[in-house]
Amino acid sequence: MNESRIYDNHGRPIDYVRIAVTDRCNLRCFYCMPAEGITYVNRKDLLSYEEISRLVAILAEMGVRKVRITGGEPFLRRDLMFLLEKIVSTRGIEAVHITTNGVLTAPHVPALKAMGIKSINLSLDTLDRQRFMEMTRRDELPKVQECLEALLANGISTKINAVVMEGKNVEDIIPLTELGRKDPVEVRFIEEMPFNGAGANYPRLAWNHRRILQELKSHYPEIHKIPDPDHSTSENYQIPGFAGTVGIIPAFTRTFCGTCNRIRLTAVGQLKTCLYDDGVLDIRALLRSGAADGEIRTAFLKAFSNRAKDGYEAEKRRSADRPVNESMSTIGG
């Protein structure tokens, strides 16, 4: 058992790292990235698997227990399963999770189960094939549904992440919720954020967490609040008779910042101590300059000691020429 603990300057523990292994994606969800004009980073600029493994080991020694692998779409990165095996076997790491769009994931599900992957977050904003194609600019819904079926059949804990957008998929809130009626999935509805390579789609957020809950209550009057896990980003609810649960993530409203225990490493090795900052430490440069593990630990600790109180403060700290509008695929979902 890893007994080390690290805390930021606000007394919040840091025990969870989200690592993007690529900025590439095989979908073009309009709320995440533009349809065209995407400049992907050179492969040599991505953190190598050896560098990622080293960073995970360092962070595990410092007290990080949970790792989530993200992208872009992580299964676009060659030999991802090799990296996952390395991370799962890292001393001190207790849980490894993956966020995926599901298009390439189904064939790997049995191996992920055998490996001990703790859970999968599956991005799925609609169950309607035409709307899926309009929102993602790709006709891949059947493959995503195949992935969901494989996850359920193999008993891997599954969360479905759906971004709620005015005029796009509001009519999908209830059909998506119904996925939890017979299967033990957590369906989570997320406020839209301005990380799409262009900025916010609307002058104001039409569907915030309160309105999403109102919509759910109008269809399920007996829906009720249940306790949230420690450091949860979602407000969690149970509908009587459902095998699964419902969560609402106020990602734009940012009400969960006070208990945030997570940091992010982008595909090019930028440390983000908040989703809304523009990178606070170039870890790749440290690694490639020959820094020893102790130097990297010191750099991490310095960054953690100057962490923004919440997403609003992180946003205010950004350079004037770098407003919040980068693509989510460059950050790590």
Image: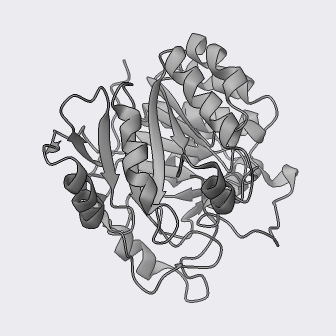
Report the residue at 21% width, 37% height from top.
238
Vertical placement of residue 21 versus 250, above or below: above
Vertical placement of residue 320 versus 327, above or below: below
Report the residue at 45% width, 87% height from top.
203
Direction from residue 255 to residue 185 in the image, left or right: right
On the question of residue 282 being in view, the answer is no
Vertical placement of residue 12 versus 166, above or below: above
Image quadrant for the N terminus?
top left
On the question of residue 62 being in view, the answer is yes
Q: Position of residue 35 (x, y in %)?
A: 76, 68
Residue extending furthest toward the top: 114
Q: Position of residue 304 (x, y in %)?
A: 41, 56
For this rendering, which residue is in front, 10 or 329? Answer: 329
For this rendering, which residue is in front, 3 or 276? Answer: 276
Direction from residue 308 to residue 28 in the image, left or right: right
Q: Within the image, what quadrant is residue 195 found in?
A: bottom right
Q: Position of residue 43 (x, y in %)?
A: 86, 50
Direction from residue 280 to residue 310 in the image, left or right: left
